[in-house]
Image (spheres, rainbow, N blue to C red):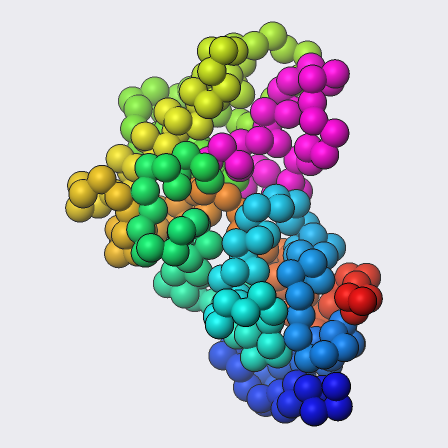
């Protein structure tokens, strides 16, 4: 135990673009929330939820996997710091690469049409629940705090594949009292017998929008080129970065009083 904590205390003064105060504060926070010098998946998800307002369980699991460079199921202090400096301070190329890694479900270096379908289906789930009659909703459905950002990305898919640019699709402005056929139905499809119709159609559109070399799949190079042309495409398949305001608040807290603006989860037993 002592050797693990001693090793974790060797926090570099500079990690990426963190200044010394930020890096040391994050190192102290890491020690506070771990007993063994390793951060587990549950603790990490608690931090993503309470600090960065993330609610999508599957997306949070993939974010953890992207931070966990050695794939041992835990984050070391260096993995924690390295992941967070891209998360909070990375440039466009670094954050786009990070988003691609989060979206790459099977880790093969490509986003297939199946990957796109699964990701879009997951990111649309809160809007689907919101549009359903109350009695038909699942008990654990939550609408992410940053859903307008995801909705804007979904609009980019449809704008890139149709001439009907005036028919904007605002998932975050859905009126529950309106009958089917409104803006949510425009994205998800009107076929009640096939709830996957909307995500499947969106995945086809997304593939056409992102597949720059037309080989039927999206490579990292395809994704980088697409985001260079339209920054909103970075999180087209789900929000996996904090908003600018949230990132600024976290960095201000780290530089100010050396804490995260959260309730620190206790170490796992």
The picture places residue 51, in percent across and down from the top left corner, at 71, 58
Q: Is residue 140 visible?
A: yes
Residue drawn at the location 62% of the way across and 20% of the way down? 131
Q: Left or right: where does residue 216 sit relative to residue 258?
A: left
- Given residues 86 and 66, the one toward you in this image is 66
Looking at the image, is 45 positioned above or below residue 189?
Answer: below
Tell whether position 137 is magenta. Answer: yes
> Dividing the image into 4 quarters, which one contains the C terminus?
bottom right
Give the quadrant of residue 224. bottom left
Q: Left or right: where does residue 82 sit relative to residue 20?
A: left
Looking at the image, is 200 positioned above or below residue 17?
Answer: above
Q: Left or right: where does residue 223 sit relative to residue 186?
A: left
Q: Which residues are magenta?
A: 120-149
Q: Residue furthest top?
A: 179
Looking at the image, is 168 positioned above or below residue 151?
Answer: above
Residue drawn at the location 72% of the way across and 34% of the way down? 140
Give the quadrant of residue 146. top right
């Amino acid at each position: 135990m002592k050797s693990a904590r001693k090793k974790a205390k060797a926090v570099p003064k500079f990690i990426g673009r963190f200044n010394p105060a930020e890096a040391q504060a994050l190192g102290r926070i890491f020690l506070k929330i771990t007993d063994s010098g390793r951060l587990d998946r549950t603790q990490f998800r608690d931090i993503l939820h309470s600090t960065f307002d993330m609610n999508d369980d599957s997306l949070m699991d993939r974010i953890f996997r992207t931070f966990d460079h050695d794939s041992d199921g835990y984050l070391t202090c260096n993995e924690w710091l390295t992941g967070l400096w891209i998360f909070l301070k990375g440039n466009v190329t670094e954050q786009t690469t990070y988003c691609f890694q989060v979206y790459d479900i099977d880790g093969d270096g490509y986003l297939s049409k199946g990957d796109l379908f699964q990701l879009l289906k997951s990111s649309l789930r809160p809007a689907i629940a919101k549009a359903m009659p109350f009695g038909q909703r699942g008990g654990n459905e939550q609408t992410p705090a940053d859903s307008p950002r995801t909705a804007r990305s979904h609009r980019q898919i449809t704008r890139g594949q149709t001439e009907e640019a005036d028919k904007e699709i605002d998932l975050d402005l859905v009126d529950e009292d309106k009958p089917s056929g409104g803006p949510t139905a425009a994205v998800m499809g009107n076929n009640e017998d096939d709830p996957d119709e909307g995500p499947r159609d969106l995945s086809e559109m997304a593939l056409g929008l992102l597949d720059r070399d037309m080989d039927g799949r999206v490579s990292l190079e395809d994704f980088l080129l697409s985001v260079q042309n339209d920054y909103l495409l970075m999180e087209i398949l789900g929000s996996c970065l904090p908003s600018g305001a949230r990132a600024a608040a976290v960095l201000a807290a780290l530089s100010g009083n050396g804490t995260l603006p959260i309730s620190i989860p206790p170490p796992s037993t």
